[in-house]
Amino acid sequence: MKIFTTVLFLISISTVAQIKGIVKDSLTNQPIPFVNIWVENENRATTSEEDGTFVFPDSEKGKNLVFSAIGYEKKTISASQSKEVLLQPANYQLEEVLISNRIQTKEIQIGKTENTVCQAFDNGPKIDTKFFPYDSSYKKTKFIKNISVYTDCRIEEATVKIHFYSVNADGFPDKELLSKDLIVKIKKGTRIHTIDVTRFNLTMPKNGIFVGFEKLLIESNRFEKKVFDKNTNTPSISVTYYPYMLYNYVEREELFTFSGGKWNKQIINTDADSEYKKKIYEPSIQLTLTN
């Protein structure tokens, strides 16, 4: 399998003038780790650390920040008022759950692509998703056993979030199907990571499912490298965050991405008379279904 690594952009935060804050549970007053924090309607973001703290450049002071975390109501607040942000726990309407015994004598893997050439992109700050449509043959293997993600990591260990979303009437990602964060540790190297999700009792929805990959912009994922400007021959420090998600170049008409605190639909436009088919870089994710 051929791998081509491309860095799309570098993320850096000034240490001179910063907005510093902490995200807490409004009921328990306990810090909330790994909260997704966006500049509203813009593709700039960060993630709260394990102790709930976060940092933004002072240049964002006049803008709004959007705070989003599984199990909590989304909150939008002025950056200048974000020294302490309290998130309200979400009220979930529990649906009746039918407990079925898994036999696990059959397995099928879905999401494979014919294109085995992958490219490693820095996908942050955003959540890219891959859509898995439902097929009637899944009735015999309706349980989601595990998820496999293909990543490139240049540090010893990195932390990411995996998301499962239902599909709304307009075909967009809708509700989170997990009641708590699925935090995954990614090891160094270019490899496929398989994560067991049987404990969540997920089944394949009749209208399909979106699976999302979220890189966490936290200190333990941060990687610094000294670079030189060829024109001035002056050094500077570039900052990026690992791991990179690997993508397949496949035939698709659209891709759904979460950025700026909202879902965005990217449509691939190709001339109807063109011999070229609609292609897009899609996250290299596969699911294993079982009975």
Image (cartoon, grey):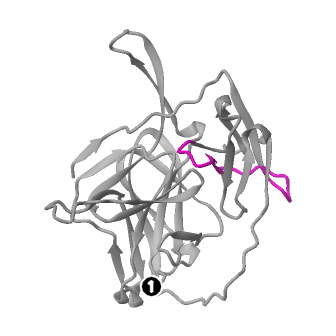
| Residue at x 72% of width, y 75% of height | 92
Give the side of residue 30 with respect to residue 216, left or right.
Answer: right
Percent coordinates x, y for residue 21 in the rendering: 75, 39
Image quadrant occupied by the C terminus = bottom left
- Tell me how many marks there are: 1
| Residue at x 62% of width, y 48% of height | 40
Give, as a three-letter code, the residue at label 1.
Lys
Image quadrant where residue 88 sits: bottom right
**195 and 135: which is toward the camera:** 135
**53 and 84: which is toward the camera:** 84
Q: Main secondary structure of the magenta part?
A: loop
- The stretch in magenta equals 24-44
| Residue at x 44% of width, y 47% of height | 123
Give the side of residue 68 with respect to residue 104, left or right.
Answer: right
Q: Is residue 100 above or below residue 255?
A: below
Q: Is residue 197 above or below residue 149?
A: below
Image quadrant where residue 231 sits: top left
Give the side of residue 5 with respect to residue 200, left or right.
Answer: left
**56 and 201: which is toward the camera:** 56
- Magenta stretch holds residue 153: no
| SS category of the residue bearing label 1 | loop
**Which residue position is annotated with label 1?**
142
- Magenta stretch holds residue 42: yes
Give the side of residue 225 with respect to residue 41, left or right.
Answer: left
| Residue at x 48% of width, y 45% of height | 124
Percent coordinates x, y for residue 73 in the rendering: 73, 62
**146 and 36: which is toward the camera:** 36
Percent coordinates x, y for residue 224 in the rendering: 48, 27
Disc 1: CA contacts within 10 A as few (<14), some (14-19) or many (>=20): many
List the single residue furthest toward the left: 275
Percent coordinates x, y for residue 6 in the rendering: 32, 39
